[in-house]
Image (tube, rainbow, N blue to C red):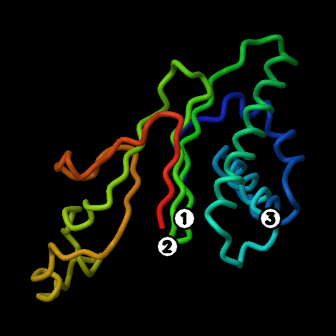
């Protein structure tokens, strides 16, 4: 997930593509900055995406990804005799059991888009279709245990429930890691 903007993405795209592994490049099917940055992240993660890597590897890969992006944006600005534009790099990466999320602005006094997390909001999310996306069958068991929810984490651009105490704003220019 990416909520933000890579400054001057169209201008740095070719240079970014040159940093990708062949495997990562072959997994880009669109034109968004999100896909290209994800490919760069996976390039830094290594070529064996089927093994479970330590969270520290994820963190290091994300840091290298940020360094590459910011360096490319800066080089592009110098080449064009322009001021360096601000990049907003809110990312979330998960393997369904672990999560790394970042909230980042490349300009210190400019706040990045909001990014919240919750480990308690699961039971209060919209339950219009608790077990059946077509809404045709609502099982009594689900309704009975509506407030029982396993361990979970939700990351979102804004709170998704009306209970403010369930949500925590990730501080600017920081990350969270959850297992």
> Pointer 3: what residue?
46
Q: Compared to 92, does 96 lie above or below? A: below
Image x and y of residue 57, in percent: 69, 61
Disc 2 + disc 1, Cβ < 8 Å: yes
Task: Please tell me in which quadrant of the rendered image residue 138 appears.
Answer: bottom left
> Pointer 1: what residue?
94
> Pointer 2: what residue?
97
Q: Compared to 11, does 62 lie above or below? A: below
Instruction: Identify the residue at image location x=48%, y=33%.
Output: 172
Disc 1 from disc 3: Cα separation: 16 Å
Could you tell whether 29 is left or right of 16 in the image? Answer: left
Instruction: Identify the residue at image location x=10%, y=83%.
Output: 144
Image x and y of residue 112, in percent: 49, 31
SS of the residue under disc 2: loop
SS of the residue under disc 3: loop
Q: Compared to 126, does 33 lie above or below? A: above
Image x and y of residue 128, in percent: 19, 68
Alpha-carbon neighbours of circle 2 within 10 Å: few (<14), some, or many (≥20)? few
Disc 3 from disc 2: Cα separation: 20 Å
Alpha-carbon neighbours of circle 1 within 10 Å: few (<14), some, or many (≥20)? some
SS of the residue under disc 1: strand
């Amino acid at each position: 997930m990416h909520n933000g903007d890579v400054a001057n993405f169209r201008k740095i795209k070719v240079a970014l593509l040159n940093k990708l592994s062949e495997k990562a490049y072959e997994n880009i099917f669109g034109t968004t900055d999100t896909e290209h940055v994800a490919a760069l992240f996976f390039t830094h993660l290594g070529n064996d995406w089927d093994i479970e890597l330590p969270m520290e590897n994820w963190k290091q890969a994300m840091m290298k990804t940020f360094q590459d992006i910011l360096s490319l944006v800066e080089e592009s600005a110098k080449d064009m005799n322009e001021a360096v534009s601000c990049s907003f790099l809110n990312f979330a990466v998960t393997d369904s059991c672990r999560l790394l999320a970042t909230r980042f602005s490349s300009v210190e006094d400019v706040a990045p888009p909001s990014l919240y997390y919750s480990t308690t909001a699961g039971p209060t999310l919209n339950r219009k279709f608790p077990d059946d996306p077509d809404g045709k069958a609502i099982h009594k068991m689900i309704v009975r245990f509506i407030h029982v929810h396993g361990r979970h984490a939700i990351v979102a651009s804004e709170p998704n429930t009306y209970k403010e105490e369930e949500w925590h704003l990730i501080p600017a220019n920081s990350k969270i890691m959850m297992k």
